[in-house]
């Protein structure tokens, strides 16, 4: 096989050709600034309104509750910092979880340095938060709960509807980072009592550098980027019109294909998991077995180093990840894998493969075969494995 097998769709996805096509006219033909008054800029204005409507429909919310951002990171920063500031007079306590993306964790740490208090909830061995622990953590000065919809490393989907109920019962705002879930799992924001939701274009076959924050009507959230009057004075800066047009097309397609796509991905995911688990001993699957993203596979192989496995898979044409893209390059094991209780040495031997509907069974056969071969080779070089085998043969 000499083509690339791309299994890193949680890091980013291929932009669909229909999406690129939808973007092109806004670079060359309809390049007017949407804030301008002349008719020429109407096409740009319309592209923005159209995408706002498409997203609002997908979440069952109102179009004027959608605010475009430069991606998931900005949306997370905005939601958490602005909510903390807006409701500061009520209290300075925030609840989140230990397995959030760094866009949330580092924002919370920033707020701690500014005098806020943050509770980082533990998760169980599957990556699920405890609803009882969540309710116990709520204090009179708690203003915000920020819990991700689905985890980017191990794929676990959190009990969002139940979290929303608890937040509502206690009068606390609920933000969810849905960057990995939006366009992949049906989301009804109101039914889940979600007050703010972050999402990103490049995780659903849309362009990079564009995302949005849903802000429920009535929230006092202030502006995050100061300047002009764009986005109803809440997010200044000339709009990324081609990006917004592309995001609209990507969301439209993602919503229309969700059911069939998830079914295909799940089938391939389970096929790959079963093949690898059956052929590679001392392997575990990280993340919840059922409550997980349809395209997420995360293995922990004992006695090997995930980075070496990644390099050797790369040489075989397979793109995967040893954790989140943001933590790769660092030698610390992933905070998510440590939070689910994996010891350092096992966390280090983890591999995340995130599929897409274009993958095939033949590719999964090839990947499973390569994993088996490479893990065996790496274990044969591992003194830890040698000790283990000797001990067990005695
Ligand atoms: N939140 C989660 C769960 C993510 O997986 C990512 C990206 O990996 C982000 C936030 C950041 O999104 P973006 O790359 O659009 O800034």
Image (cartoon, rainbow, N blue to C red):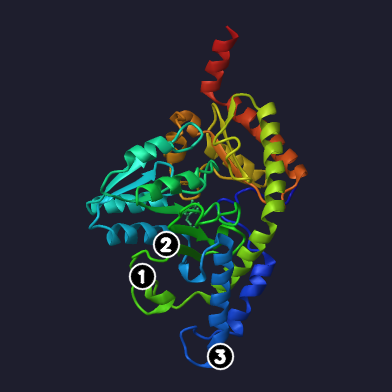
* Disc 2 CB within 8 Å of nearest ligand 1 atom: yes
Q: Earlier in the sequence, mark 2 or mark 1?
A: 2
In this picture, residue 253 sits left or right of residue 229: right
Write the residue at 22% across / 51% down: 115
Above or below residue 44? Residue 286 is: above
* Earlier residue among tags 1 and 3: 3
Question: How many labels were placed on the picture?
Answer: 3
Helix, strand or loop at label 3? It is: helix
Q: Position of residue 250 (x, y in %)?
A: 62, 64
Q: Quadrant of residue 279?
A: top right
Q: Earlier in the sequence, mark 3 or mark 2?
A: 3
How far across and how far down the image is residue 289, in percent?
Answer: 59, 35
SS of the residue under disc 1: loop
- The quadrant in which the C terminus is found is top right
Please tell me which residue lies in front, 157 or 329.
157
Element under disc 2 = helix
Query: Residue at label 1?
Result: 225
Q: Residue at x 49, y 83 (%)?
A: 34
Residue, far top: 394
Q: Residue at x 30, y 46 (%)?
A: 118
55 vs 114, left or right, is right
- Neighbour tally class for label 3: few under 14, some 14-19, many 20 plus, Cα within 10 Å: some
Whether residue 207 can be seen here? no
Residue for badge 3: 40
Q: Residue furthest front?
A: 169
Locate residue 69 relative to residue 350 in the image: left or right. Answer: left
Mark 1 packing: few (<14 Cα in 10 Å), some, or many (20+)? Answer: some
Determine whether label 3 and label 2 are within 8 Å by CB: no
Checking the image for residue 74, the label placed there is 2
347 or 23, nearer to the observer = 23
């Amino acid at each position: 096989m000499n083509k690339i097998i791309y299994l890193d769709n949680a890091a980013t996805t291929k932009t669909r050709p229909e999406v690129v096509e939808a973007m092109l006219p806004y670079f060359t033909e309809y390049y007017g600034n949407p804030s301008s008054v002349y008719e020429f800029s109407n096409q740009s204005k319309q592209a923005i309104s159209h995408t706002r409507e498409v997203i609002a429909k997908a979440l069952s919310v109102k179009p004027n509750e959608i605010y475009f951002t430069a991606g998931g990171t900005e949306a997370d920063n905005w939601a958490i910092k602005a909510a903390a500031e807006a409701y500061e007079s009520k209290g300075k306590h925030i609840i989140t979880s230990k397995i959030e993306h760094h866009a949330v964790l580092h924002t919370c740490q920033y707020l701690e340095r500014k005098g806020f208090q943050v509770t980082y909830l533990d998760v169980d061995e599957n990556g699920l938060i405890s609803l009882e622990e969540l309710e116990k953590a709520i204090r009179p000065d708690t203003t915000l709960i920020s819990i991700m919809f689905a985890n980017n490393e191990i794929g676990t989907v959190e009990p969002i509807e139940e979290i929303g109920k608890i937040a509502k019962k206690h009068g606390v705002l609920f933000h969810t980072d849905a960057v990995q879930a939006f366009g992949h799992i049906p989301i009804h924001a109101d039914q889940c009592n979600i007050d703010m939701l972050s999402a990103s274009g490049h995780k659903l076959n849309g362009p990079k550098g564009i995302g949005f924050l849903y802000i429920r009507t009535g929230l006092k959230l202030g502006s995050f980027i100061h300047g002009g009057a764009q986005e109803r004075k809440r997010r200044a800066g000339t709009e990324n019109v081609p990006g917004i047009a592309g995001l609209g097309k990507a969301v439209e397609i993602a919503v229309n294909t969700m059911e069939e796509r998830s079914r295909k991905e799940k089938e391939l995911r389970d096929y790959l998991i079963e093949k690898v688990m059956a052929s590679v001993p001392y392997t575990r699957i990280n993340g919840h077995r059922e409550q997980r993203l349809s395209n997420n596979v995360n293995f922990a192989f004992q006695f090997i180093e995930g980075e070496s496995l990644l390099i050797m898979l790369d040489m075989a044409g397979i793109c995967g990840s040893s954790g989140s893209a943001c933590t790769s390059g660092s030698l610390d094991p992933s905070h998510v894998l440590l939070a689910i209780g994996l010891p350092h040495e096992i966390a280090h031997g983890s591999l995340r493969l995130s599929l897409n509907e274009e993958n095939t069974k033949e590719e999964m056969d090839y990947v499973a075969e390569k994993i088996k071969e490479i893990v065996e080779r790496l274990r044969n070089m591992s003194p830890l494995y040698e000790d283990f085998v000797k001990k067990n043969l005695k």
